[in-house]
Image (cartoon, rainbow, N blue to C red):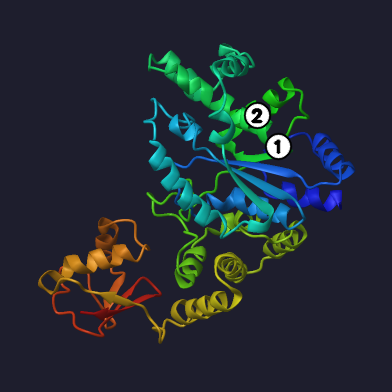
Amino acid sequence: MDIENTLKIMLKGADSYTDKEQIIEKLREVERENRPLRIKLGLDPSAPDIHIGHAVVLRKIKQLQDLGHEAIIIIGDFTGMIGDPTGKSKTRKQLTKEQVEENAATYKEQIFKILDPNKTTVKFNSEWLGKMNFRDVIELSAKCTVARILERDDFKKRYEGGQPISVHEFFYPLMQGYDSVAIKADLELGGTDQTFNILMGRNIQKDYGLSPQITLFMPLLEGLDGVNKMSKSLGNYIGIDEDATVMFEKAMKIPDELIIKYYELCTDIHPDDIDKVKERLAGGENPRNIKLELAFEITKLYHDAKEAENAKQHFITAFTNGQAPKDIPELKIENKEDIPNSILNALIATGKYSSKGNIKRLFEQGAVKINDEKVTDFRNTTDLKDNDVIQIGKGNYYKITM
């Protein structure tokens, strides 16, 4: 194993992690035992819709898989019946077994768009948690004090604010920690919001006489607005299932100050090559040139190089030259009796706009043209006909189909 290179790739973009010396010792340990790192990632099956913000941790695992290590993905079908209380101001509604299984199936479909299935094992934690008897549960609960549990901000705030905390919620971090015992995890990854739960796994492994896992925490990714965490509800996201053209166009909206962060968290580019990008930016190169390369790299990960190149050329034609591309997407008008509202519905369905109110404001701001003429009121679209062209902003073109 090239420990220096492994460490460099592992820590690229990381927010925090176990002491470097302990990481190096863990790498030497698995090398002595002639085996790969067992990388643990726990997934909460109540949120199965992945965008590239969710994919930050998955991309890190893929980079380590490319170095020969293996991933063990734990679908929390058992813990999912409790629900992760992290950041919640009240007890979460428990999911049914059927809901958990349905969500888990969706998750499995999506994670293999990123991870190498030949180096990934998917397990459900009911496999071991569902077999524990009450004596086992008492033994597990003895591994942590109430004071330690109440160190968590969410529990602390609810306790001090007089909000109810159910006893079963205390078991969530304990159960997630025991997952690390069950699979003998070497490394656990997660977002910074999972720090308490992941460190609990490290502590519980020690209590069960195992070599403690090393930890790696990835930062939360700001969305395309550059301010808020990437979120579908805020409309500032790039979905991993989106069309290549849409994905490329959205990636070009990444704020200049986040170019390096997106390179580090959303691509598989080697850290040494990212250093060269930093030098180009520092040397005064136009960020737009570098963003074209970044958008290509992101799009290529979820499509292929040819599709990414086509998306790039589409963007250059539409946005740089100000021309309507030849292959513009259709916008289907379903209701000829109410064309204005049908237009709003059709535009929302493209996934590019966060709300109807947002689209109406684009009209009001003069950002919409129909057949190259500005239209400032969405209601003035009743005369639309087949093959009319709507342009929204600098380069979003649609051909009307009635």
Query: Mark 1 Cα within 10 Å, few/some/many (few <14, many 20+)?
Result: many
| Amino acid found under the numbered disc labelled 1 | Ala
Q: Can residue 296 be seen in this view?
A: yes
Residue where numbered disc 1 is placed: 185
Circles 1 and 2: CB distance less than 8 Å? Answer: yes
The quadrant holding residue 214 is top right
Residue 201's label in the rendered image is 2
| Amino acid found under the numbered disc labelled 2 | Gly
Dot 1 or dot 2: first in sequence order is 1
Residue 197 on image: x %, y %: 59, 29
Residue 233 on image: x %, y %: 37, 49
Q: Is residue 289 above or below residue 93?
A: below
Q: Is residue 370 above or below residue 212?
A: below
Residue 124 on image: x %, y %: 55, 40
Quarter the C terminus occupies: bottom left
Residue 54 on image: x %, y %: 53, 49
Q: What element carries label 1?
A: loop
